[in-house]
Amino acid sequence: MTKLFEVQEAIYARLSTELGNKVNGVFDYVPEDTKFPYVVIGRLQSTPERTKTTVGERVEVELDIWSSAKGKKETISIVNLIKDALDEELSIPGVDLIDQDITSVEVLEEINDLYHGTVVFEVLLDMEGD
């Protein structure tokens, strides 16, 4: 059984607390008329991780930052806040967290003067833990 939702919940709780008033929310689904900047918990991917002695799962989460500020400065600032927030080990019920890390960051200009940042965050779980 995958722990995708549990990982999403842990990330949501951490970012909602740590980003505070720096963004207008952390969302799985963005409500209409939400003002920029905000963070979206985007793509979730799970890959089985098995060895001779463990059954685990590698979960990759893409976090999308959206900003309407001129230039990349605000987006990069939020990326850095996310990096700081996810530096401390997450607590995910029912598993042992073996490792967690940000594996990539990208910031680019989208259409209509929007700036989009992506942070790819990966956790490695031992499913027989707890």
Image: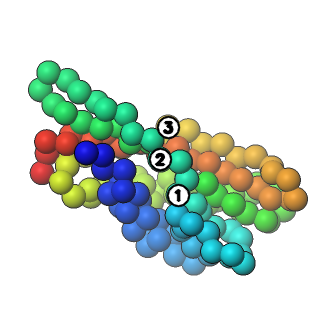
Q: Which of 14 and 125 is in front in this view?
A: 125
Q: Which of 4 and 39 is in front in this view?
A: 4
Disc 2 from disc 3: Cα separation: 14 Å
Residue under numbered circle 3? 103
Badge 1 crowding class, 10 Å Cα cut-off, few under 14, some 14 to 19, many 20 or more, is many
Which residue lies at the image location 44% right of the left edge and 73% below the top edge? 17
Q: Is residue 28 above or below residue 21?
A: above
Q: Quadrant of the N terminus?
A: top left
Asked whether the beta carbons under mark 1 and mark 3 sit within 8 Å of each other, the answer is no
Asked whether the beta carbons under mark 2 and mark 1 sit within 8 Å of each other, the answer is yes
> What amino acid is labelled 3 in the image?
Thr
Q: Is residue 53 above or below residue 126?
A: above
Residue under numbered circle 2? 44
Residue under numbered circle 1? 41
Residue 98 can be seen in this image: no
**Picture coordinates of residue 83, whole percent (x, y):** 50, 53
> What amino acid is labelled 2 in the image?
Leu
